Amino acid sequence: MPVLPSWLTEPLWDQFAALLPHRPVFDPAHPLGCHRRRISDRTVFDKLLQVLRFGCSYQAIADTTCSTTTIRARRDEWIRLGIFARLKQIALDAYDRIVGLVLDEIAIDGAITKAPGGGGAAGRSPVDRGKQGMKRSSMTDGYGIPLGRVLAGANRHDSPLLAPTLDLLDGLGPLPDEITVHLDAGYDSDKSRNLLGERGLHGRIAQKGTKAPIQATRRWHVERTHAWQNAFHRLARCYERRGHVINAFFDLADTIITVRSLIRRAWTTHRWDTRPQRQR
């Protein structure tokens, strides 16, 4: 399945546009009463999707329709308004309402990616000859729908990031009475077990020294989600230096992953007027 199917762009923009505040085509505060036309939000949105998908620089994607400065300025404006976070939450709510999030089985794991630009979320990568890298501690539901992530330098161990990652559960609304957290051997310690016990969570943690196929659990869902996210080249090789910008791109990618999964899973259980004749 394509990372960003062509049929997904239009509905994604429709929901994104509904969250945007109204802006006049011309600036009414201009001293001469006139000004050049404002670049359309749709043009900038398409540029950001290209940056996210292909990982290209803003300079490479800018052209006569939209400058680099406009892309960055509009991106920062949307981040200040919380548009990307709200879009992701809407996608999660829709998925939960139609398909249902599997919150009684969650998985958490860390992934290291390149961060040549450095920045606050970067550090020396232990798997890339000490170059700048970024670690994300991601949490998914039992199917692999991304629920959130915590960013840190690549030199951070997975275990200390477990607590702030579990804190993301607080924003998901009502939770099941019993939740099982699937973790790999990097979390095999008394500290991790005590942390889960204090929060009333059950842990299935792989043991150190035992081969993975023998003790495979449902944590493979989060590993698959890491692969889905790394298919967006802006996330696999991140040049952004500011954490809130990186999180905005992750929110946009997670929205695409969630809606894509929603459509594919609902295809066999639901009917709607524009439903395609075959599963995509």
Image: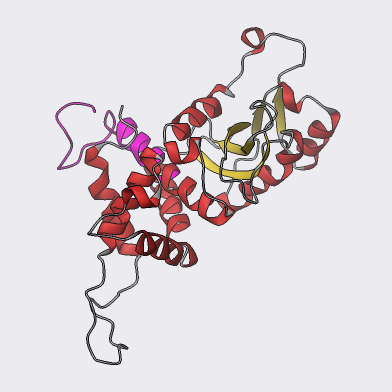
- Residue 188 horizontal side relative to residue 17, left or right: right
Residue nearest the observer in this picture, 127 or 205: 127
Q: Where does the image place residue 224, in percent across and percent down from the top left? A: 49, 25
- Residue 276 horizontal side relative to residue 239, left or right: left
- Check the image and report above or below for 31 versus 114: below
- Tell me if residue 279 is in the magenta stretch: yes
- Residue 45 horizontal side relative to residue 87, left or right: left
Q: Where does the image place residue 19, in percent across and percent down from the top left? A: 35, 64
Q: Residue at x 30, y 63 (%)?
A: 18
Q: Residue at x 82, y 27 (%)?
A: 189
Q: Which residues are magenta?
A: 254-280
Q: Residue at x 30, y 74 (%)?
A: 22
- Quadrant that contains the C terminus: top left
Residue closest to the far right: 190
Residue nearest the observer in this picture, 32 or 109: 32
Q: Judge whether residue 107 can be spotted in this image.
A: no
Q: Residue at x 29, y 61 (%)?
A: 17
- Residue 232 horizontal side relative to residue 43, left or right: right
Q: Judge whether residue 84 can be spotted in this image.
A: yes
- Check the image and report above or below for 196 versus 76: above
